[in-house]
Amino acid sequence: MTLLAISDFLGRFHPLLVHLPVGILLLAVLFQWILLFPRWANLKPAIPVMFFWGMLAAVFSCITGYLLSLSGDYDVETTDRHQWMGIYTAVASLAIYILHRINLGEWINRVAGLIVLVLVSITGHLGGTLTHGEGYLTEGLNKADGNDAIWKPMTDVQEATVYNDLVQPLLQARCYNCHGSTKQKGKLRLDGPEFINKGGEEGKIIVPGKADESALIERLLLPLNDDEHMPPKEKTAANTNGSGALTLVDSKRCRL
């Protein structure tokens, strides 16, 4: 087993570990504020311990996240911001642990806790952007009002342009989550003709004029239970609503 394979294996623990600091640190901040009520005073000794373990969990999350980033499957700029915010969160957690130990005052600790809350929120948002793509928070709202439907109704198919009206909406619906601007599994992007022609780490995916010899088409035509079928069988279950927009159920795993 090569060193790169080992780092990739360890990096895949990041989605598992990353939820530990989020939960621990958010609960610690909550405990800080409910101490305003005397009945919860017995929780006070647990708070510095929670910040300490939250800091350790954040450190391990940063390490595994870095190893995962070495795959090159994610947008470099967003990955760097996400990673640095995670580091800041770990450092801030350690600082609050020290503040609790030297006991400079409860309100100083609470303000510091709010800083950690902001750092955790920003780090989580950037992680969501890497996993689900830009605008994932408002995507559901856009689908609900039907104004940004992926699949536009066509009154005359003869007037449609092949890429803009037929190919691009299909790729956007099925492929952009894993092969778009923020995430490129297998170093493959499908959100523009120039990227499609370039191919991925396994080479070209389109052979001009020879669809049956193109890797992209071969993957699409594999049996649904084949591990190499694209998109993966659990990725999308689509139906069309009244406005013509596609409603998607996604899991973000794709390996073309």
Image (tube, rainbow, N blue to C red):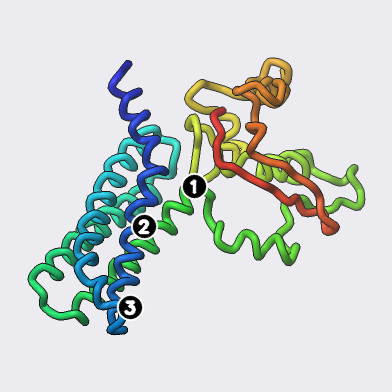
**Which amino acid, mark 3?**
Ile
Q: In this view, does 214 lie to the left or right of 43?
A: right
Q: Is mark 1 on a helix, strand or loop?
A: helix
Asked if marks 2 and 1 touch (Cβ < 8 Å), the reply is: no
Q: Is residue 72 left or right of residue 105?
A: right
x%, y% of residue 169?
72, 45
x%, y% of residue 170?
72, 41
Q: Nearer the viewer, mark 1 or mark 3?
A: 3
Question: Cα distance, mark 2 to mark 1?
Answer: 16 Å
Picture quarter with the N terminus? top left
x%, y% of residue 247?
73, 51
**Figure check: 53 above or below 174:** below
**Which amino acid, mark 2?**
Val
Picture quarter with the C terminus? top right
The total of numbered circles placed on residues is: 3
Q: Name the residue under label 3.
A: 34
**Which amino acid, mark 1?**
Thr
x%, y% of residue 162?
78, 39
Q: Which of 193 and 212 is in front in this view?
A: 212
Using the rendered view, name the quadrant where residue 12 is placed. top left
Q: Which residue lies furthest to the left in this view?
A: 102
Q: Residues within 10 Å of mark 3 (few under 14, many from 20)?
A: some
Q: Name the residue under label 2.
A: 22
Q: Residues within 10 Å of mark 1 (few under 14, many from 20)?
A: some
Question: Cα distance, mark 2 to mark 3?
Answer: 18 Å
Q: Who comes first in sequence, dot 1 or dot 3?
A: 3
Using the rendered view, name the quadrant where residue 192 is placed. top right
Q: Mark 1 points at which residue?
A: 131
Question: Cα distance, mark 1 to mark 3?
Answer: 33 Å
